[in-house]
Amino acid sequence: MAFDNNCSFAGNLAKEVEFKINPNGLAIAKFTIAVDNGKDGNGVKLDPTYVNFTAFRKAAEAIANNCNKGTKIGVISKYTTGSYTDSQSGEKVYTHGFIVEQFKFLSPKKNNQTSQPDSAPNYNAALPNSGQQSYGGNPNIGNNYPRHNGDHYPPHDDMPY
């Protein structure tokens, strides 16, 4: 039985998007959303969970150009792991994160925003009557994060969990 590595989250940006273009010209956006955890059995609001994401290429540009702290966004992502050697201590550091595959702006569009990001072509059109935009399902937006060599991912077994 095959399982997909899909993780879905919806929440508000906890801080401003960090956007950069690397030396190879790859657009990268890093951002954190606060995911609501509801209330406990006594009705007390639980603290949110903060989830970190990385988006690449056109998705990175669209998120950086259209999101600010507090923007509500839905994200479908892939969970990834990796490692590097700390240059100070020489110890191996293990990392994990979520790579954006698709996303949808869930906050209503502001009056001064256009229906499309400046750098995005027509396939990023707003949904009818929603004031929201959805991205993904296009090779220029989703499913095109940089590929890693096999060393990046841990070995897999055939366990179903």
Image (spheres, rainbow, N blue to C red):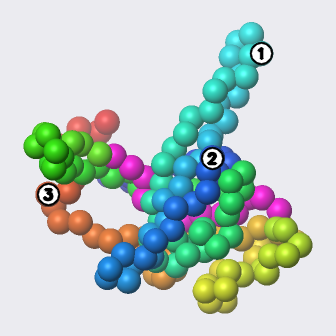
Residue extending furthest toward the top = 42
Image point 82% across, 68% down: which residue? Answer: 109
Q: Quadrant of residue 120?
A: bottom right
Circle 2 residue:
14
The secondary structure type at the circle numbered 1 is: loop
Image point 61% across, 86% down: which residue? Answer: 119
Depth check, front residue: 77 or 31? 31
Query: Where is residue 74 drawn, in percent x and y?
Result: 63, 55
Please check the rendered image and state whether residue 99 is part of the magenta-colored stretch, yes or no: yes
Image point 43% across, 52% down: which residue? Answer: 98
Query: Where is residue 5 drawn, in percent x and y?
Result: 39, 52
Query: Where is residue 106 drawn, in percent x and y?
Result: 74, 58
Query: Where is residue 79 drawn, in percent x and y?
Result: 38, 50
| Magenta span main SS | strand
Above or below, 133 against 83 in this view is below
Residue type pointed to by label 2: Ala
Which residues fall within the magenta stretch?
96-108
Asked if the residue under mark 3 is in contact with the one under mark 1, i.e. CB atoms within 8 Å, the reply is no
Picture disc at residue 43? 1
Image point 46% across, 71% down: which residue? Answer: 20
The secondary structure type at the circle numbered 2 is: loop
Circle 3 residue:
151
- On the rendered structure, is 4 left or right of 84? right
Q: CA distance from mark 2 to mark 1?
A: 24 Å
